[in-house]
Amino acid sequence: MIVVSSRTIKSILELQSEEYSNILSLLVKLADDNHCNSELVYSICGLFTNVSLSSKGKMVLSHEGAGPTLHKVLKTAKGADLAHAAIAALFSLASKNGMLNKMLVEDSIISTILSVLKLFRQSTTIEVCFGLLEELCKASECALQLVRESDIISIAMNSMQIHSEIPELVASAFSFLRMVVTVEKNERFHLDLAKRVLSAMKDNPDEGSVQSIGCHLLADLPKCRALKNLFQHKRTETILILAAKAFPDLCKNAINNIFQR
């Protein structure tokens, strides 16, 4: 059994270049050949999550095919714990890894993520899904189009309300939705989104990430009469002014852009 600990990870990171590549290659093959062995693969996913935080680890794992293997694990995961471990490892590996992200999109990972969002309701899994989706959309216009054609956007918007007490998830949903608003043309969607963002900001007044990303998301929304009326409403002004006072460095410029519409 592989035990994921700081000592295990440190030992791998300290290996010489050839040994390092060989051990990671072996682990990728082990996960690929045993993707239904949830206990074993769960441990390997945890190790990959940590190893891929380094540029060296990310490069080697990508070269050895860890992305497709983790996607295979995610597609066949029966339990919530393994699904979360796989999606977390993919997110860590995919961060700022455009070539891998494009390959994953071609391998239909968007539909896999949609299935995960529908099957597993754990807030931490949902949060990481949105983080991975943001990375995929940054790397691929195709990913963005597939997201728009799916139920993922409505799931993200609903998650902001259902899990409004979890600021990390709300901030992750906000950040992902910033990728969408620039290409979405539906004014009713923009108005609904703005109302939900403001509601989530109101529920998290002391969370800098929620306030900052929320303000920038609102500022990203295109101009329209309905939004102008909403932003001039007294309750909206109160939420935004409180954000500007609490986190001036993070929010002030975005709020100025909102009020200058």
Image (cartoon, grey):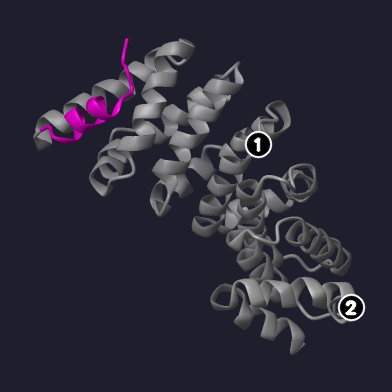
Counting from the top left corner in percent of width and height, residue 210 is at 64, 59
Q: Which mark is residue 234?
A: 2
Q: In the rendered structure, which segment of residues is drawn in magenta?
A: 1-15
Q: Is residue 131 above or below residue 20?
A: below
Q: Where is mark 1, residue-wise?
A: 123
The secondary structure type at the circle numbered 1 is helix
Q: Tell me the CA gap for discs 1 and 2.
A: 32 Å
Counting from the top left corner in percent of width and height, residue 88 is at 48, 36
Is 153 displayed left or right of 105 in the figure?
right
Q: First in sequence, mark 1 or 2: give its number.
A: 1
Q: Are marks 1 and 2 in contact (CB under 8 Å)?
A: no
Q: Is residue 211 above or below residue 164?
A: below
Q: Nearer the viewer, residue 151 or 162?
A: 162
Is 247 displayed left or right of 217 in the figure?
left
Q: Quadrant of the C terminus?
A: bottom right
Counting from the top left corner in percent of width and height, residue 257 is at 68, 84
Label 1 Cα neighbours within 10 Å, binned few <14 / some 14-19 / many ≥20: some
Badge 2 amino acid: Lys
Q: Residue visible at 61% across and 43% down?
A: 127
How many labels sit on residues?
A: 2
Q: Is residue 10 magenta?
A: yes
